C-alpha cells in the first residue's frame, strides 16, 4: 500500500513539474530543433512509458530514501537516476539518429537530472512530513 501511495504522489509531482517544462518552457525549443522528426503523440506508448518510469523512480530512489530517512539521498540519487535514464534516451538518439542535435541532448540531460532530483526531493518531503510515511 505504501508503494501505491508513493507512486501516486510521485506521479502528480512529476507531471506538475514536467508540464511546465514541456508545455511552456521547451515547446518552442523542441519544435525548432526536432520539428522535422516530430509527429503526433502516441498516447498509449507515452502512458506506458510514464507508468514504468514513475515506478522506477519510486522503487530505486524514493522508497530507499524513505527507508534511510534521507532527503539528501532522495535528491542526489534522484539526480543520478534522471541523468542515467535521460542519458539512455538522448545518447541513444545521438548515436543512432542522423539529425539528432547535440544541443537537445545536453539540455535534456540537464532537465532530466533536475526533474528527477526535484520530484524525488519534493515527494520525499511530502510523504514524510504531510503523510507521515516512514
Image (tube, grey):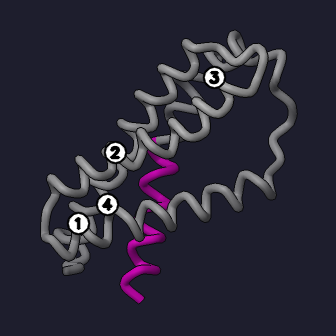
Residue pictured at 39% horizontal, 49% vertical: 81
Q: Secondary structure at mark 4?
A: helix
Residue 5 located within the stretch drawn in magenta: yes
Assess whether mark 3 and mark 4 are in contact (beta carbons under 8 angstroms). Answer: no
Decide which of 7, 75 is in the foreground and name it: 75
Q: Nearer the viewer, mark 2 or mark 1?
A: 2
Assess whether mark 1 and mark 2 are in contact (beta carbons under 8 angstroms). Answer: no
Say if 71 sits above or below 112 in the image.
below
Q: Earlier in the sequence, mark 2 or mark 4?
A: 2
Q: Earlier in the sequence, mark 3 or mark 2?
A: 3
Residue corresponding to mark 3: 27
Q: Is residue 36 left or right of residue 31?
A: right
Q: Which residues are magenta?
A: 1-17
Q: Is residue 107 left or right of residue 61?
A: right
Residue 50 image position (x, y, % from top left):
61, 56
For the N terminus, which image quadrant?
bottom left
Residue 90 image position (x, y, % from top left):
59, 31
Say if 56 sits above or below 77 in the image.
below
Q: CA distance from mark 2 to mark 1?
A: 13 Å
Residue corresponding to mark 1: 65
Q: Earlier in the sequence, mark 2 or mark 1?
A: 1
Q: Nearer the viewer, mark 3 or mark 2?
A: 2
Amino acid at each position: 500500500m505504501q508503494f501505491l501511495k508513493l507512486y501516486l504522489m510521485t506521479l502528480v509531482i512529476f507531471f506538475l513539474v514536467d508540464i511546465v517544462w514541456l508545455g511552456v518552457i521547451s515547446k518552442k525549443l523542441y519544435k525548432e530543433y526536432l520539428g522535422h522528426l516530430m509527429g503526433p503523440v502516441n498516447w498509449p506508448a507515452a502512458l506506458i512509458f510514464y507508468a514504468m518510469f514513475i515506478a522506477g523512480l519510486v522503487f530505486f530512489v524514493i522508497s530507499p530514501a524513505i527507508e534511510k530517512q534521507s532527503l539528501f539521498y532522495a535528491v542526489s540519487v534522484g539526480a543520478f537516476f534522471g541523468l542515467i535514464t535521460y542519458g539512455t534516451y538522448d545518447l541513444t538518439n545521438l548515436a543512432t539518429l542522423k539529425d539528432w542535435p547535440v544541443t537537445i541532448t545536453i539540455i535534456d540531460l540537464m532537465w532530466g537530472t533536475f526533474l528527477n532530483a526535484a520530484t524525488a526531493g519534493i515527494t520525499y518531503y511530502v510523504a514524510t512530513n504531510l503523510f507521515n510515511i516512514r
